[in-house]
Image (cartoon, grey):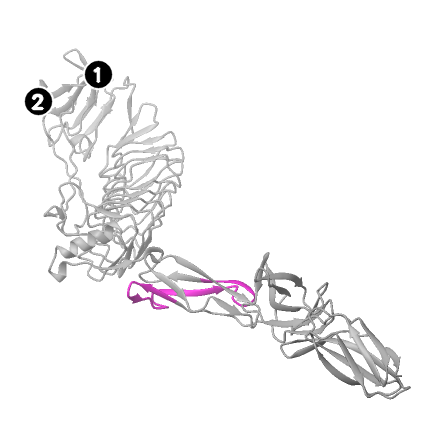
Amino acid sequence: MKKKVLSCAVALALVGGAFGVLPERADFDTAITASAEDLVYGDYTYHVLDDGTVEIYSYSGSLSKVTIPSQIAGKNVTKIGAYSFYDNEYVKSIVIPSTVREIEKSGICIGVDTSRTTMTIDSANPYLVIKDNVLYSKDMTKLIYILNMDSVKSFIVPSTVKTIGASAFEYCRALTSVTIPSGVTTIEDSAFASCESLTSITIPDTATTLGTRLFNDCDNLKTATLPKKIVSADSSWWFNGCQKLTSVNIPQNLTSIGQGMFYGCTNLIKITVPDTVTSIGSMAFMGVGVSSLIIPKNVKSIDSAAFYGCSKLTSITLPDGLEKIGIQAFNRLTKLKTITIPKKAKVVVEEGQGDFYGEFYESTNLTVRCFAGSPMETYLKNWNNNHSDAAWKTKYQVIHPDFKGCTFTADKAVFGYTGKAKAPTVTIKDGSYTLKQGTDYTLSYKNNKNIGTGTITVTGKGNYTGTKTLSFTIIPSNVGGFKAASTSASAVKLSWNKVNGAGGYIVYQYNTSTKKWVRIAKTGNVNTYTVKSLKAGTTYKYAIKAYKTVSGKDYTSAKYPTITTSTKPAKVSFKATAASKAVKFSWSKVAGATNYIVYYRVKGTSSWKSVKVANNVTSRTISGLVKGKTYEVTVKAVRTVNKVNYNGAYDVKTVKVK
């Protein structure tokens, strides 16, 4: 069991369980406490370690030269605890026996003034060695700490060293430069803490294990080059109080920005946080001088006061996956105008802190943008509802993710092709509120000129986020000039005007039995089509659409003109018999005929005379003819549809009148 405790207290004024004002730095104080297991041996106070050996942790004697005993009560002395000679003005030299394998350092080297006190180690000690006032492991692979820490100004770490121990250079206030060889792999806690004169440092890429508080209170440190990648690190308080720090790289695979990592670095104006970081500790950037910062996409949590008092911060981007925000993480951001809180993020109040100050209220120029239905919206609603004083309220806007709850209406869904770009307008309603283009959203168009499917992309702006895609179609114009160009007893030839941009035409015929239109032809880019194998003397109805095939889909004109036409009736089969000054006609009925016309003329003359006969009559006698004259005669069937006469074919016969 340990008999003394090193306590680290952050100098923050806690008011009502929340952070008060921004302190100049976070300090780490020390205190010594005693244990119930303290034992006394002469001037030494000690206790027995778990392995049965002895740790000396206090000397109260007045000798100027102290030789540490190798054994106490038959047990090897293996450890000299921190502050064992604290405030002892008598001691001038200390001799360490061969049994000791650890000499602690915290604050000042073993609690004595090393400028006037020397320490030597028994040459038979297999664990430790002192060389040039530096304590090393016997094999020189670990630099444990500097003994003459008040006087060393520059230092080159030996090439044998693999580990720089905890607090190795701590309180080397005169140290201005240190050279670390590439063989170093581990740098332990507080290794360079309180090196007040150090202005720059480079840690080699071989150092992949780093402890906490590495450069705590290095008041004049301006630049620090850290390894590109690390295996293990506790980045808490690395640069706490480094007020002059202007440049530092963060290792590319660091997973956490530790507690107070850049606390009070007021001159650090640029930081790039790697994508490997998943969490940001409390007070990590407290008071930092950056004006803009992008939090990488993998960060899930930001702890309390992480950005408290960043008075120069004007822009901060939070990742969509952020889930946890500690209390007052964004308090006193006096220059930040807006901050958008991701959908899942919620304020997490640590135990005992309560909700006294709220998250953003002291950032007086800040408007918080939060998503509708998100934990942050609920938090801010409750906060403002519980505080009637306007000074305590937080300004916020509600963002509608993916236009949730909005309705979209395009002014037109179908356009006829004209060769010009189409830009349908969109009306977006959020309840009774009509969104404003340019303020709440923007529109962009694609494939909006040629026949096919065009798209409208609505992109959220301001309080609306996400995109919404609407579609519309551009189709060929309607066909004009549709008519029956010619007919026969078994065919109808259709014709029309060509449509600009069309790839072809679809012809339909009306089925009177099913009362449906049936497609009978799909043409190329022509303007006529002949329907064949029709019944003579029959009425037909046709329609036509222009089309164009785009990506395997036919786009057709919206409306189709129709025409009603008829095939010609069949040729009349008739007989003509001569009579006295007359010709007698008889014929068989022709299907579909509405009437018949009997024609006659004297052979060799050019003008026909005709007699119209009703469709239910199949004979007729033409009288008053000239005896002995030869006449040309015929009978023609006629079908009238929509005031259009369709004349059947006919045969001409000759008859000599009696």
- Where residue 242 appears, as percent x and y from the top left, is 25, 48
| The magenta stretch spans residue 388 | no
Quarter containing the N terminus: top left
Does dot 2 land on a helix, a strand or a loop? loop
Q: Is residue 652 visible?
A: no
Q: Could you say which quadrant of the image residue 630 lies in?
A: bottom right
| Vertical order, 69 against 318 (above or below) | above
| The magenta stretch spans residue 449 | yes
- Where residue 370 appears, as percent x and y from the top left, is 27, 55
- Where residue 102 appears, as percent x and y from the top left, is 24, 24
Q: Residues within 10 Å of mark 2 (few under 14, many from 20)?
A: few
The residue located at (14%, 27%) in the rendering is 84
Residue type, numbered disc 1 = Asp
In the image, which residues are magenta?
A: 427-456
Q: Is residue 52 visible?
A: yes
Name the residue tied to disc 1.
51
Name the residue tied to disc 2.
36
Question: Which residue occupies the foreground of this view, 367 or 585?
Answer: 585
Q: Is residue 371 left or right of residue 523?
A: left
Q: Could you say which quadrant of the image residue 178 lies in?
A: top left
Does dot 1 land on a helix, a strand or a loop? loop
How many numbered marks does the figure carry? 2
The residue located at (23%, 20%) in the rendering is 100
Q: Are marks 1 and 2 in contact (CB under 8 Å)?
A: no
